[in-house]
Amino acid sequence: MEAEREEKHNQKQARVAQRKHEKEAAKRSATGEITEEILMGPSKMLEPFEQAFSNSTAFFSTYNPDMIEEALVKVLRKEKIEPKVSPKKYKLTFTRVCQDENTGEPQHVKMCVRILRVDEEKVCVEF
């Protein structure tokens, strides 16, 4: 169990390092220096998380919100679903087609995924 946890931690570190490498060339501070905040900070507006009621369709993460959004879009496109991605905030909308269990007829289910700021290190991915 400990080996599995360490492997997941190592995989996360590798993805974070790759993210830093990719953004390093794209973003620089006003002085030309590359800072940790520029490399790993969110690139869109990150709305605050407000828990108004118990929501079981959410999870929390310390990953960069851009990395989460990119992973979600990649998985959806692999499933032949083209999401609508908000250009200003972390919000995806898409329609999933599935079959009704009783009638067997296709059902169109519209979904929305938002990524919200919990604190300086943690985000909430809400479905």
Image (spheres, rainbow, N blue to C red):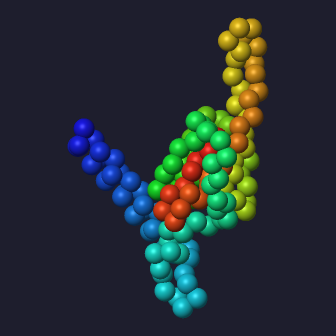
Say which of 79 and 57 sits in front. 57
Position in image of residue 17 (x %, y %): 40, 64
Position in image of residue 31 (x %, y %): 54, 91
Residue in the image at 57% along x and 51% along y: 124
Q: Relative to residue 118, is residue 80 depicted above or below? A: above
Position in image of residue 120 (x %, y %): 52, 65
Residue in the image at 53% along x and 62% along y: 119
Say which of 117 and 40 sits in front. 117
Q: In this view, does 108 lie to the left or right of 61?
A: right
Residue in the image at 28% along x and 41% along y: 4
For the C terminus, the image quarter is top right
Looking at the rendering, which quadrant does residue 103 occupy? top right
Q: Is residue 74 visible?
A: no
For the N terminus, the image quarter is top left
Q: Relative to residue 10, is residue 88 depicted above or below? A: below
Q: Is residue 11 visible?
A: yes
Residue in the image at 62% along x and 45% along y: 126
**Residue pushed farthest bottom?**
31
Q: Relative to residue 25, is residue 90 depicted above or below? A: above
